[in-house]
Image: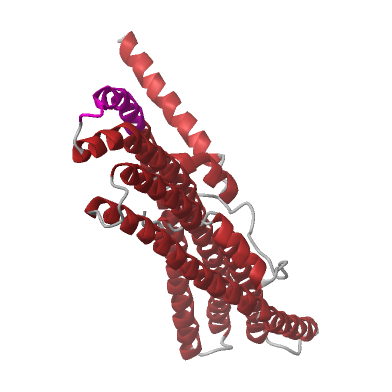
């Protein structure tokens, strides 16, 4: 019996503790969410596995190299000699290249997670603004509905007026519920990026990611950085170094450029160089798109500010009229909604500008698209 009581008390204590933890809330800090969870994402874990496998392959290739060295002598035919030399020197070099490649790719994958997370966080913030706007509209319709029912009892309005207010009320309620579902969905998608429970809720986003006047360097500066830092470039150049090494080993056994093995080695080297040149063209085009996107968004900021200024002016005018009793509550609430809409539109664009700048800066570093690594 005592054991049962102790167990029951433990269950109650556990429930109370979890309830208290839930009540304390869960603030959404996107930067902390990324830093605390990025290593546990599926993509990053896979990258770590690839690195570990490459390191294991290198260790094995290094061990095998000594046994190949023991087999090397002048009596071997050229084909066997090439096979032995490749096992002795090329295999470890290839494994070392794989370590380098997968290590660089891990950083690219981490950047992809960040881009995906910040992009989704932007969707979360926009959805939260839309939810707040719908809440404001619902509150207005609820007040009008309650007022209509009261006025009906006083004989001031007709039943048709109340019915119209009721329809508006339920329409606003449906829109609010839809906005809430969309916000919940955006949170789920954000959680999904980090492979955490999609049903985790957050009290409120801690900070916004906005920008309206970013420092934009010259297009050539961005291209220059990208052509120096991108994963396609650094891995591609290392791949060329590897193919040159492989070709030199082949030439040591088959020096004639007319030999089949020599031709294959030369072909692989030329292909690596051609691939790098094609990657440079792709990267330049990629930067051009991102650069133009950022500039286009920045050019839109003034019109959004003008729209907000007009909405603020109309709201202030409406507030004065409403306070002196010459403007109806419906018309005043309409101006409040217009103001909130203009504020949301400006915030959304500021988030888009921040995101566009982040993508451009990331693209000028090692990048965020592992699918472009074809080596």
- Whether residue 71 is in magenta: the answer is yes
Q: Residue at x 51, y 90 (%)?
A: 158
Chosen colour scheme: secondary structure
Q: Quadrant of residue 63?
A: top left
**Relative to 44, is 219 on the left or the right?**
right
Q: Say whether residue 80 is visible.
A: yes
- Whether residue 325 is in magenta: the answer is no
Q: Quadrant of residue 163?
A: bottom left
Figure quadrant of the C terminus: bottom left
Residue 70, image x, y percentages: 27, 22
Q: Is residue 298 above or below residue 199?
A: below
Q: Quadrant of residue 309?
A: bottom right
Q: Observer-nearest residue: 230 or 358?
A: 230
Q: Is residue 157 above or below residue 122?
A: below
Q: Residue at x 35, y 32 (%)?
A: 58
Q: Is residue 16 above or below residue 230?
A: above
**Relative to 28, is 346 on the left or the right?**
right
Furthest toward the top, the residue is: 2
Q: Observer-nearest residue: 100 or 259?
A: 259
Q: Residue at x 48, y 29 (%)?
A: 17
Numbered range of the magenta stretch: 56-75
Q: Assign the magenta stretch its main secondary structure.
A: helix
Figure quadrant of the N terminus: top left
Q: Is residue 330 above or below residue 255?
A: below
**Relative to 101, is 86 on the left or the right?**
left
Residue 94, image x, y percentages: 36, 41
Q: Observer-nearest residue: 106 or 171?
A: 106
Q: Observer-nearest residue: 8 or 204?
A: 204
Q: Say whether residue 49 is visible.
A: no
In this rendering, the count of numbered labels is 0
């Amino acid at each position: 019996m005592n054991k049962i009581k102790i167990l029951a008390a433990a269950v109650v204590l556990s429930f109370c503790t979890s309830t208290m933890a839930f009540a304390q809330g869960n603030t959404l800090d996107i930067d902390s969410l990324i830093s605390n969870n990025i290593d546990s994402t599926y993509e990053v874990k896979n990258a770590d596995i690839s690195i570990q496998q490459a390191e294991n392959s290198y260790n094995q290739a290094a061990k095998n190299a000594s046994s190949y060295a023991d087999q090397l002598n002048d009596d071997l035919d050229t084909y066997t000699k090439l096979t032995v030399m490749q096992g002795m020197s090329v295999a470890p070099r290839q494994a070392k290249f794989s370590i380098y490649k997968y290590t660089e790719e891990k950083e690219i994958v981490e950047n992809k997670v960040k881009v995906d997370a910040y992009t989704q966080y932007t969707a979360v913030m926009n959805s939260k603004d839309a939810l707040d706007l719908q809440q404001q509209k619902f509150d207005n319709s609820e007040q009008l509905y309650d007022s209509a029912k009261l006025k009906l009892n006083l004989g001031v309005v007709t039943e048709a007026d109340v019915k119209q207010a009721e329809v508006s009320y339920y329409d606003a309620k449906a829109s609010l519920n839809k906005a809430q579902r969309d916000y919940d969905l955006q949170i789920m998608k954000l959680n999904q990026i980090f492979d955490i429970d999609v049903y985790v809720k957050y009290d409120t986003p801690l900070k916004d990611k906005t920008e309206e006047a970013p420092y934009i360097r010259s297009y050539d500066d961005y291209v220059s950085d990208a052509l120096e830092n991108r994963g396609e470039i650094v891995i591609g150049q290392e791949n060329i170094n590897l193919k040159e090494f492989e070709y030199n080993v082949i030439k040591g056994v088959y020096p004639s450029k007319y030999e089949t093995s020599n031709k294959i080695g030369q072909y692989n080297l030329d292909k690596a160089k051609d691939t790098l040149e094609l990657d440079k063209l792709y990267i330049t085009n990629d930067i051009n798109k991102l650069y133009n996107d950022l500039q286009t968004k920045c050019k839109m900021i003034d019109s959004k500010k003008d729209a907000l200024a007009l909405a603020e002016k109309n709201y202030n005018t409406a507030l004065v009229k409403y306070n002196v009793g010459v403007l109806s509550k419906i018309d005043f609430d309409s101006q409040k909604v217009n103001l909130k809409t203009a504020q949301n539109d400006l915030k959304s664009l500021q988030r888009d500008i921040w995101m566009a700048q982040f993508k451009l800066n990331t693209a000028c570093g090692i990048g965020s698209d592992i699918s472009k690594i074809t080596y």
